[in-house]
Amino acid sequence: MVIAQAFPSDHAEELLSQRCAFTGLDVRERISFAFLMNTVWLPFFSVRCYWACCFIMLLYLAGLTSAYSAVNVWTTEGILERVVYAAPLAANTSWVVVAFMLNLTICLRDLGWHDENRVGGSPAFAKGAIALVAGLGCQRGFLPADLAWSLVAAHALMGISRMHTEVDKVRFPILSMDANIASWARWGAAAVCAASAAGLCLAAAMRWGS
């Protein structure tokens, strides 16, 4: 994606030159800002400044979301633009949504909202986060058939399921494993995959019918 930005087509240049109404930054600058936030986040996380990390992650997500709103599967043209420009932005944005929820869970733990094993949040909070990630994945996978977003979301949900089913006391406290949360995550991933398949079929039907 970085190399492609240096040699864009006329249409891609038009997309990348769009300016944000709020910040005045073009798409290249918004992407640069987002990844700068990722760079800034790492040292704060290493010294366990989790609230600062959460704020930085929110800025990271805002930058990616802003860029993604301008460059996505609807605004790009042809397979090359979608693979080179839209897919990396979609995949990154989808992943950072999950990362932000995890960062928020750590902050909630520091506020005292945790179980006896110091796992932040609660089963209800975890299910709400799963529903949010799955809902966004289904929406992006079905309507615009944005597989980069939806498949990353499904992968993240399956990771949550594995964390609550495969015993690894280093990765996650055994006594905090919850089969119900694992089931929610698996069904969420299945729903995202089903929505993505339906979206792909719908997109193909629309193309063949046009």
Image (cartoon, rainbow, N blue to C red):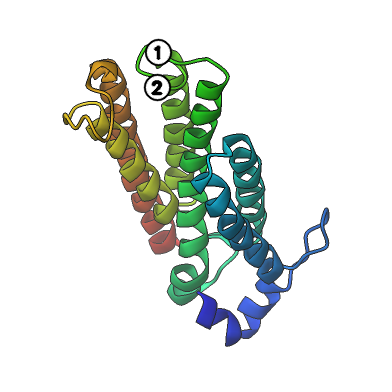
User: Which residue extends farthest left?
Assistant: 167
In this rendering, would 6 be left or right of 117? Answer: right
Residue at 67% x, 48% y is 59
Instruction: Please give the residue where the numbered disc 1 appears in the rendered image.
Output: 115
Verify CB contact (< 8 Å) between mark 1 and mark 2.
yes
User: Which residue extends farthest top?
Assistant: 116
Front one among 101 and 87: 101
SS of the residue under disc 1: loop
Residue at 60% x, 48% y is 61
Q: Position of residue 208 (x, y in %)?
A: 38, 63
Residue 65 appears anywhere in the view: yes
Front one among 15 and 176: 176
* Dot 2 crowding, Cα within 10 Å, few <14, some 14–19, many 20+: some
Position above or below: 89 against 13: above
Mark 1 and mark 2: Cα distance apart in space: 6 Å
At label 2, the amino acid type is Val
